[in-house]
Image (cartoon, grey):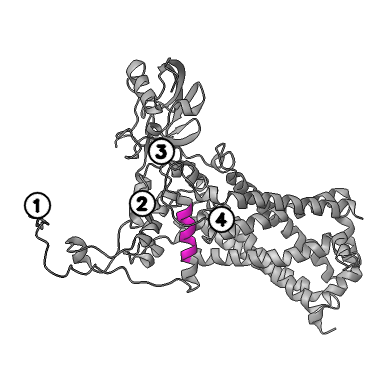
């Protein structure tokens, strides 16, 4: 080959805008985003709650600094992200250890894939995460 | 089936001429399409009528050789295995498979994929080298054991899975669905004894741990090979091996030589045509 | 085979988090739900509740366990994302060392905060 081939890698576009089929692709993206959000919150959370080591005054000071409707909504978002990340994490664990993908089969058209096989699981994940998030929303904001 | 008239379809083809073009660009061609025409047929027509220098790779026209993987209307598919009618659009956009470098027009450079494939040792690894070089009998394998890997052995190495994988989109170290699926194909073969060797070859960033089951590879595979399934099964086996839960087995032995007198109606094997170099 | 071991711990840590963070979220945020279950509690962020939990060996131990598991799980996941962006050789090393140091520092700091709280179970008071 005399001329060097031209690179054609999709880059991060390939992570986010799959633009193609399977909704598992979007669960993958959402799992990453919720994970990053949870990690960012968690690091802040360590610092905020560590004030309790100093004593009641600094604890109350920290708590009043993170009170108010904006923080309440933020905390709820963390709760919802946890609900999704946890339930989807159970699905991924089951799949990635080889349990929920089925055995190898004879590929006969129209092909049945492991993705199709776990689709009911994926739908259940969304349903359960949604129910937990709604339940949490009611507990956070309505059932006082 | 009832449609007999031709219709006009626009073929948007992504062109790139190395040495001349700085960037790939899209080129439009309108062609008449008959019922039953595949995208590959359409490309031949475009080449015949308006773009004689258009380049792509194709050979068998029947989804066996794995040459004509392309990005067709945003999805990696085989051009010969895709009916224009099934796209349900008057525009057919054809681009080279992403995540591979472009050699020219629709020709991707598949070499990095094949190099990784080779490095993961896609062949039976056994101690009886002489028997493999100069086979005398078959290795023992039940139909049930065959099913453990048969699906993965249908792979035609077209590269569609690599073009669909989000990890391959950014990470050149990751082996990708095809080589990993083929490594699992041999790991799952009862005649093979190379699990430990392949496990070492899979260390570092190329291994199956970079797969997060976005599932695209299995959705686009034109042969139903389901690389995502192979990769998850591989992860399960490797974790079981780490936790010392994996069943160890010796590679299948040779079948017993037939006993009793040879039946007369069976002709003798022909003379060897290949002798040792 | 370091990657295999790291990944397996990632899954294990995920399981620990699932249980402990589920418990933590329920206690901290789902007060009405706890009320339905008959486990009505004082406002969990009041100092009195905080001090009570700090005095409990169960809470102290699970805090430290959850802290470690969550930091490992989160930083390994973050490392995955960074590594898949194909950093160069040196940058990979920086990411590995950097995330390990930051993670261990946060673990040490968080453990101190869990153990040093006034009236903490481990302080003997």
Helix, strand, or loop for circle 2?
Answer: helix
Is residue C85 at all visible to an observer of this figure?
no
Q: Which residues are magenta?
A: B229-238
Badge nearest the viewer, 1 or 3: 1
| Residue denoted by label 4 | C80
Residue B145 position (above or below residue B23): below
Q: Quadrant of the C terminus of chain B?
A: bottom left
Tell me: B213 left or right of C116: left
| Residue denoted by label 3 | B101
The residue under the point 32% across, 64% down is B192
Residue B229 position (above or below residue B243): above
Query: Do callouts 4 and 1 mark residues in contact (Cβ within 8 Å)?
Result: no
Q: Chain of mark 1?
A: B
Query: Do callouts 1 and 2 mark residues in contact (Cβ within 8 Å)?
Result: no
The residue under the point 47% across, 55% down is B231
Tell me: B202 left or right of A142: left
Instruction: Report x, y in % for residue A17.
Output: 58, 38
Is residue C98 at all visible to an observer of this figure?
yes
Query: Do callouts 3 and 4 mark residues in contact (Cβ within 8 Å)?
Result: no
Q: Chain of mark 3?
A: B
Helix, strand, or loop for circle 1?
Answer: loop
Q: CA distance from mark 1 to mark 3?
A: 42 Å
Helix, strand, or loop for circle 3?
Answer: strand
Instruction: Report x, y in % for residue C53.
Output: 84, 73
| Residue denoted by label 2 | B153
The earlier-in-sequence mark between 2 and 3 is: 3
Marks 4, 1 in one chain: no
Q: CA distance from mark 1 to mark 2?
A: 28 Å
The earlier-in-sequence mark between 1 and 3 is: 3
| Residue denoted by label 1 | B273
């Amino acid at each position: 080959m005399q001329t060097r081939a031209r690179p054609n890698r999709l880059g991060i576009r390939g992570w986010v805008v799959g633009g193609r089929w399977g909704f598992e692709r979007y669960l993958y993206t959402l799992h990453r985003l919720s994970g990053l959000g949870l990690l960012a919150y968690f690091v802040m959370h360590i610092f905020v709650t560590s004030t309790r080591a100093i004593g009641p005054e600094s604890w109350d000071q920290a708590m009043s600094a993170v009170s108010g409707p904006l923080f309440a909504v933020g905390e709820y978002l963390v709760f919802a992200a946890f609900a999704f990340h946890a339930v989807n994490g159970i699905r991924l664990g089951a799949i990635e250890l080889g349990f929920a993908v089925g055995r190898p089969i004879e590929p006969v058209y129209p092909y049945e894939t492991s993705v199709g096989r776990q689709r009911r699981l994926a739908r259940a994940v969304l349903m359960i995460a949604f129910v937990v998030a709604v339940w949490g929303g009611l507990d956070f904001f309505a059932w006082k | 089936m009832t449609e007999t008239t031709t219709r006009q379809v626009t073929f948007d083809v992504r062109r790139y001429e190395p040495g001349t073009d700085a960037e790939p660009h899209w080129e439009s061609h309108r062609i008449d399409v008959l019922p039953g025409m595949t995208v590959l047929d359409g490309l031949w027509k475009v080449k015949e009528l308006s773009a004689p220098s258009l380049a792509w790779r194709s050979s068998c026209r029947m989804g066996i050789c794995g040459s004509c993987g392309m990005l067709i209307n945003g999805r990696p598919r085989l051009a010969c295995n895709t009916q224009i009618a099934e796209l349900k659009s008057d525009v057919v956009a054809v681009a080279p498979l992403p995540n591979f470098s472009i050699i020219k027009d629709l020709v991707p450079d598949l070499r990095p994929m094949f190099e990784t494939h080779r490095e993961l040792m896609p062949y039976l690894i056994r101690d009886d080298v002489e028997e493999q070089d100069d086979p005398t009998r078959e290795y023992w394998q039940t139909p049930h054991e065959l099913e453990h890997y048969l699906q993965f052995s249908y792979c035609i190495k077209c590269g569609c899975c690599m073009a669909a994988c989000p990890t391959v989109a950014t990470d050149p170290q990751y082996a990708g669905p095809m080589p990993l699926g083929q490594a699992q194909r041999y790991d799952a073969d009862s005649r093979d004894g190379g699990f430990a060797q392949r496990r070492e070859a899979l260390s570092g960033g190329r291994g199956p741990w970079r797969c997060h089951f976005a599932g695209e590879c299995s959705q686009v595979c034109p042969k139903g090979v389901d690389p995502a399934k192979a990769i998850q099964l591989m992860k399960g086996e490797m974790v079981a091996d780490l936790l010392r839960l994996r069943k160890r087995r010796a590679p299948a032995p040779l079948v017993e030589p037939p006993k009793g007198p040879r039946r007369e109606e069976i002709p003798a094997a022909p003379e060897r045509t290949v002798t040792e170099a | 085979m370091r990657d295999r071991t790291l990944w397996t711990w990632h899954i294990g840590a995920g399981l620990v988090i699932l249980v402990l963070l589920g418990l933590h979220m329920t206690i901290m945020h789902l007060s009405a739900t706890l009320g339905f279950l008959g486990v009505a509690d004082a406002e969990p962020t009041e100092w009195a509740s905080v001090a009570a939990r700090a005095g409990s060996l169960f809470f102290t131990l699970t805090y430290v366990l959850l802290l470690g598991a969550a930091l490992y799980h989160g930083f390994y996941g973050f490392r995955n994302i960074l590594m898949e962006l194909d950093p160069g050789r040196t940058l990979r090393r920086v990411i590995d060392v950097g995330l390990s140091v930051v993670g261990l520092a946060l673990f040490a700091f968080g453990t101190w905060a869990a153990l040093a709280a006034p009236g903490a179970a481990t302080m003997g008071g």
